[in-house]
Amino acid sequence: MNKDVIIACDFKSAEDTFAFLDLFRDEPRKPFLKIGMELFYAEGPSIVREIKRRGHRIFLDLKLHDIPNTVKKAMAVLSRLDVDMCNVHAAGTVAMMRAAVEGLTREDGTRPLLIAVTQLTSTSEQTMQQELLIGATINDTIVRYARNAREAGLDGVVCSPLEAGMVKEACGAEFLTVTPGVRFADGDVGDQVRVTTPARAREIGSDYIVVGRPITAADDPVAAYRRCVAEFCG
Ligand code: C5P
């Protein structure tokens, strides 16, 4: 498994996104990009096609969570966009995740990687227990959701890098851990709660780190991206 850094393109428009991507024009390593709700809802599927045309791999982070039939049909539409990775919320149940795999699988049997969000990296154990009334510990919840995702045939989960080791232990080394909540040791945490550095994420066993503001809001985004790659990919 090749470790990689995925840049979260949390921009409001195609114009802002391409201004950012133009900074990487001479970069030998074409960054793997994440397109999330803000950009997808603003620009629609055309932004995915255009970024794909530029040769980037794409993680389409729309975090589907609905009844199984709706998720299956939505996934069939996303599958035609030819992205490399997409996701659902594990809280949608094993039945919903199975439906997502079915919808995503093309007639020739191929499909993008499919991963499930366990608990958002902005959620603390206290919020989970007191507001969402989930009585288990956050770690037990994450491991259970990861096992559910594996049982449903998914390729891995989104979790905090701090949880990557225990997910691998529960679900096997091949089960992917895609981990946002990454910050440089000298950087701002922002609204994230369960965070660590790229170097520590590598040690714990993340396969992909998803990094947004530490790169997109840096004075020199290319330098920040290179720093992430150097720390995480070695
Ligand atoms: O700017 P920052 O590095 O915090 O961006 C993290 C990205 O990862 C955001 O696009 C956020 O939506 C996403 N994400 C997350 N936690 C999850 C799942 C996705 O932060 N559990």
Image (spheres, rainbow, N blue to C red):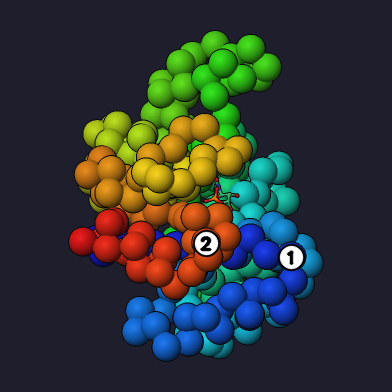
Tag 1, which secondary structure?
loop
Residue 89 lies in quadrant: top right
Q: Which quadrant: the C terminus?
A: bottom left
Residue at x-position 41% and y-position 79% = 30
Above/below status of 157 relative to 234: above
Q: Looking at the image, which residue is at 32% across and 53% down? A: 207
Q: Earlier in the sequence, mark 2 or mark 1?
A: 1
Q: Residue furthest right?
A: 42
For the residue with label 2, is its CB less than 8 Å from the closest atom of ligand 1? no
Residue 190 in the image: x percent, y percent? 58, 41
Does the image show residue 75? Answer: no
**Residue 126 locus on image (x, y percent):** 56, 16
Helix, strand or loop at mark 2? loop
Q: Amino acid at mark 2?
A: Ala
Residue 70 at what x, y percent from top left?
72, 51
- Where on the picture, by quarter, is residue 160? top left
Which residue shows up at 27% across the image and 49% down it?
Answer: 199
Residue bearing the label numbered 1: 12
Q: Calculate the distance from the C-alpha at mark 2 to the C-alpha at mark 1.
A: 17 Å
Between 200 and 140, the one nearer to me in the picture: 200
Residue bearing the label numbered 2: 218
